[in-house]
Amino acid sequence: MTNERREYFPPEEVIAEVEQVLASHGQGDIDWVTFVGSGEPTLQTSIGWLIHQVKSLTHIPVAVITNGSLLYLPEIRLELSSADAVLPSLDAGNAQLYRKINRPHPDFRFNHLIDGLIAFRKEYQGKLWVEVMLVKDINDTVEALQEIAMALKEIKPDQVHLLLPMRPPAESWVQPSDICGVRRAKDILGSVRPIKIPASIPRETTAQVITKDNLELAILGIIQRHPMQENELHNALGKWPFDEVHDALEILLAADKVQIIKRYQQCFWSPAESIYNG
């Protein structure tokens, strides 16, 4: 865990890969160019430069998915200002739940998160879509949702996107909110800001990896971001035939480089070093 800003990835290599992907797709094939991280993307010191470079390459809109923890810093707000959409997380309306759900770096403060989101909204001209991950009996109660609603009333995002933790979480007690919890969230949060349950928004799961020559390295690069089902991997690895992807997964599993995690009777592929308590 770190809050150190530095170049975690060579920015020129990132742009080179973006150029290759754009060149390999026709007009209308790509909806968004989305910056996400194996961690928090705003820790990458060149994030502002990367956004500008992508926008110089294409008219496709650029999105940034962030935990929002660094938006209290003026330089971060400036660096994200040219993105077409920014999607920060707001999963709690008080410091205690923020710690429980998001487990931020010890130096981060809940008031910094809220103050940063408010300041960013005042300065930012693009689409601000706040994401709320609903965890059953944790932040989908009436009290918890009312606290989030109070924060949203101050932040004034364009939309609130309700998400559910369907992939294997770090803790076994994390369960997605049920239908009643989602309806409760729509009613309470929707009373202050427009609600959307996303079907097609800037997300990393629809990306296609076409620039890696080594299939096993490509798989590891994808699942380091989050666990994925095999069919998701096949969609992302459209360059390679189905059988080759399946065989590569088996090779990685035999070499103890990946693991299979079960969630809701479904299997997810994850790096071997990832820890899932319980």
Image (cartoon, helix red, strand yellow):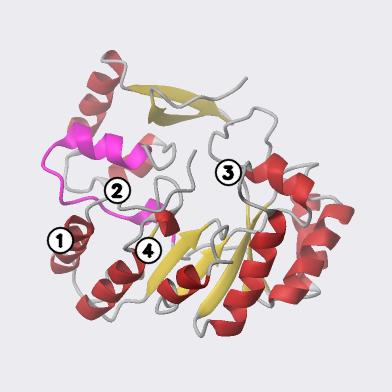
Determine contact: label 3, label 2, CB under 8 Å.
no
Determine contact: label 2, label 4, CB under 8 Å.
no
Secondary structure under tag 4 reads: strand
Image coordinates of residue 42 in percent, x first then y, are 43, 59
Q: Which residue bears the numbered disc 1?
A: 16
Secondary structure under tag 1 reads: helix
Q: Is residue 139 visible?
A: no
Mark sitting earlier along the chain (3/2):
3
Q: Which residue bears the numbered disc 3?
A: 105
Image coordinates of residue 186 in percent, x first then y, are 76, 64
Secondary structure under tag 2 reads: helix
Image coordinates of residue 108 in percent, x first then y, are 62, 51
* Kind of residue at badge 2: Ala
- Number of residues whose C-alpha sits closer than 10 Å to that of mark 1, classed few (under 14), some (14–19) or many (20 or more): few
* Kind of residue at badge 3: His
Mark sitting earlier along the chain (3/1):
1
On the image, which quarter does residue 249 sit in?
top left
**Which residue corresponds to the image point at 77% horizontal and 75% vertical from the top-left?**
153
Mark sitting earlier along the chain (2/1):
1
Determine contact: label 1, label 4, CB under 8 Å.
no
Mark sitting earlier along the chain (2/4):
4
- Residues 54 and 69: in front is 69
Secondary structure under tag 3 reads: loop
Q: Which residues are magenta?
A: 203-223
Residue 236: give its label: 2
Mark 3 vs mark 1: give the one in front.
3
* Kind of residue at badge 4: Thr
Determine contact: label 3, label 1, CB under 8 Å.
no
As drawn, is 115 to the left or to the right of 225? right
Mark 3 vs mark 4: give the one in front.
3
Q: Quadrant of the C terminus?
A: top right
